[in-house]
Image: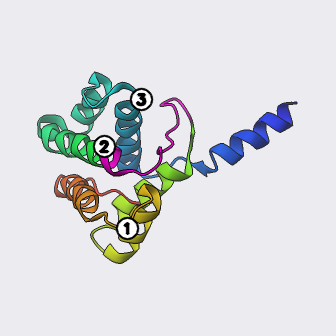
């Protein structure tokens, strides 16, 4: 029975957490906001801890990205609980978009289209680019 549950876990959560600490901060904030709302205090605290006094810009932009994705997604976007040491395919795609949106825009656009299930993703992609830039501007680029 434990092998079956391990196989089911690997099917639902096929990706390991990213090694990049900045990607882990984004992932934690997105999981908290996705599960507990955009005003989640623990997500805000995680960004405050990571960025210090400069936490407001990344926090506001992650909130905007989460709201944009929720408004534009054609189907639910799967997120894992915060304590989970693995990632869903949707989380992996979103981190991939953030890691490449500034350098490989067309690739990021295709990934975002697949994630949201629609063709018109320019607004959400702009939100993702703003998040990636906010992290990079503070010396914390998101990479996979």
Decide which of tag 3 and tag 2 comes sooner along the chain.
3
Residue placed at 42% from the left, 70% from the top? 110
**Of 128 and 115, which appears nearest the observer?**
115
Residue placed at 20% from the left, 46% from the top? 61
Can residue 104 be seen in this snapshot?
no
- Where is mark 3, residue-wise? 35
Q: Which colour scheme is used?
A: rainbow
Highlighted magenta segment, given as a residue range: 69-84
The Cα–Cα distance between marks 3 and 2, rounded to whole angstroms, is 11 Å
Where does the C terminus fall, quadrant-wise? Answer: bottom left
The Cα–Cα distance between marks 1 and 2, rounded to whole angstroms, is 18 Å
- Where is mark 1, residue-wise? 119
Horizontal and vertical percent for residue 12?
65, 44
Horizontal and vertical percent for residue 104?
34, 75
Where does the N terminus fall, quadrant-wise? Answer: top right
Q: Compared with residue 64, is residue 36 higher up or lower down, i.e. above or below?
A: above
- Where is mark 2, residue-wise? 66
**Of 71 and 82, which appears nearest the observer?**
71
Can residue 22 be seen in this snapshot?
yes
Q: In which quarter of the image is residue 13?
A: top right
For label 1, count other residues whose C-alpha is less than 10 Å away and answer few (under 14), some (14-19) or many (20+). Answer: few
Decide which of tag 3 and tag 1 comes sooner along the chain.
3
Q: Closer to the camera: disc 1 or disc 2?
A: 1
Horizontal and vertical percent for residue 42?
32, 24
Residue placed at 34% from the left, 37% from the top? 29
For label 3, count other residues whose C-alpha is less than 10 Å away and answer few (under 14), some (14-19) or many (20+). Answer: some
Residue placed at 19% from the left, 53% from the top? 134
Q: Closer to the camera: disc 3 or disc 1?
A: 1
- Queried whether the magenta region covers residue 101, the answer comes back as no
**Of 89 and 84, which appears nearest the observer?**
89
């Amino acid at each position: 029975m434990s092998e079956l549950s391990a196989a089911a876990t690997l099917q639902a959560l096929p990706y390991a957490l990213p090694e990049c600490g900045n990607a882990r901060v984004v992932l934690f904030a997105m999981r908290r906001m996705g599960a507990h709302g955009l005003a989640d205090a623990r997500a805000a605290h995680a960004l405050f801890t990571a960025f210090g006094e400069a936490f407001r810009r990344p926090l506001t932009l992650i909130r905007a990205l989460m709201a944009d994705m929720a408004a534009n997604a054609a189907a639910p976007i799967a997120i894992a609980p915060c304590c989970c040491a693995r990632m869903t395919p949707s989380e992996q795609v979103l981190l991939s978009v953030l890691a490449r949106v500034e350098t490989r825009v067309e690739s990021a656009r295709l990934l975002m289209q697949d994630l949201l299930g629609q063709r018109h993703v320019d607004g959400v992609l702009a939100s993702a680019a703003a998040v990636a830039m906010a992290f990079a501007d503070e010396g914390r680029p998101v990479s996979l």
